[in-house]
Image: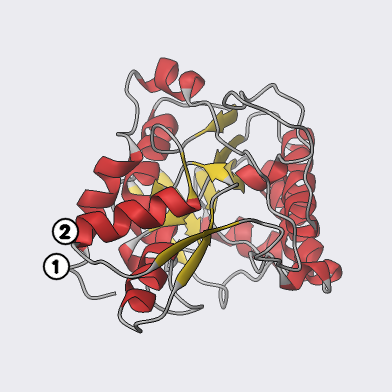
Amino acid sequence: MRIAVLGAAGQLGRDLCSRLPGNVIPLSREQIDLTRPGEIPSAVAALNVDAFINCAAYNFVDVAESEPEAAFAVNAWGVRTLANACRTSGIKLIHFSTDYVFGLDPASKPFAEDDPPGPVSVYGLSKLAGEYLVQSISPDALVIRTCGLYGVWGSGGKGGNFVEMMLRLAGQGKPIPVVDDQRCTPSYTVDVAEASAALIRAGASGLFHVTNGASCTWYEFAAEIFRQAKLTPQLMRTTSEEFRRPARRPSFSVLSTAKCAATVHSSPRPWPEALAAYLVERQTKTP
């Protein structure tokens, strides 16, 4: 089996490549750029692969509010062209999406794959459009929603991930305000990669949620980061209203992973255990 991975150098793509079956072909933006749709069909056809995994996305959540065209160019229209190219060449497409497709409707239990989405940001809307386009063009495609990704290979560039940001702020000696009214599941890219690879090996199609287990607010996540790292900065609770950002975030975007667990007969570990593993891994790898 030959599998191409677009976004292979990113935090999820890097961990995914080493866990996939068969011959893996890592691709960068220089080789396939979703903002240049005219080049995509011939580039995809020339790969001669059985499956194509898209880990690439426009994920500048706040900037997307003022640059919707840029977000949709990658997350929707570029993905549409990619899906058409894969269908034409008989290639199975695996596409990653986000918990940000939710947020409009209040919820108190994890969202299942068949719950109606309702994004509250341009970024979330562009990712939902990409999901719909992939599924309408290629019914055999696998779409994986995940949440709050952090990984060693993404700890550099674009400000790093949330864990690295908290550790960096802890060393500055200033109060650290973190929102306590947004609940989700921070997810370690190693665990998401392993579950995603299991779905691919199982030949899964359709929509799946893949995250670590349990849930927390971002404040609770930060508190656990500092507890496990044995740090005692001045961590402060704040609200989304007080910590205003250009893009609105979902107040609750916990995803149910029951469908994935039933398909591959295993579930990623709870997020505190995953965090502990990340803190160990970051000491042994140089991104």
Instruction: Find residue 152 and report its horizontal and vertical position in percent.
Output: 31, 65
Q: Nearer the viewer, mark 1 or mark 2?
A: 2
Which residue corresponds to mark 2? 280
Quadrant of the frame with the C terminus: bottom left
Secondary structure of the residue carrying tag 1 is loop
Outermost residue on the bottom side: it is 172
The answer to whether any part of residue 222 appears in the image is yes
- Total labels drawn: 2
Q: Are marks 1 and 2 in contact (CB under 8 Å)?
A: yes
Quadrant of the frame with the N terminus: top left
Task: Tell me which amino acid carries mark 1.
Answer: Thr
Task: Tell me which amino acid carries mark 2.
Answer: Val
Which residue corresponds to mark 1? 284
Please name the residue shown 72% across and 41% down the image. Answer: 103
Q: Nearer the viewer, residue 242 or 142?
A: 242
- On the rendered structure, is 264 left or right of 145? left
Q: Quadrant of residue 70?
A: bottom right
Secondary structure of the residue carrying tag 2 is helix
- On the rendered structure, is 74 left or right of 146? right
Q: Is residue 221 above or below residue 62?
A: above
- On the rendered structure, is 33 left or right of 200? right
Please name the residue shown 58% across and 61% down the image. Answer: 56
Please name the residue shown 68% across and 46% down the image. Answer: 250
Q: Residues within 10 Å of mark 2 (few under 14, many from 20)?
A: few
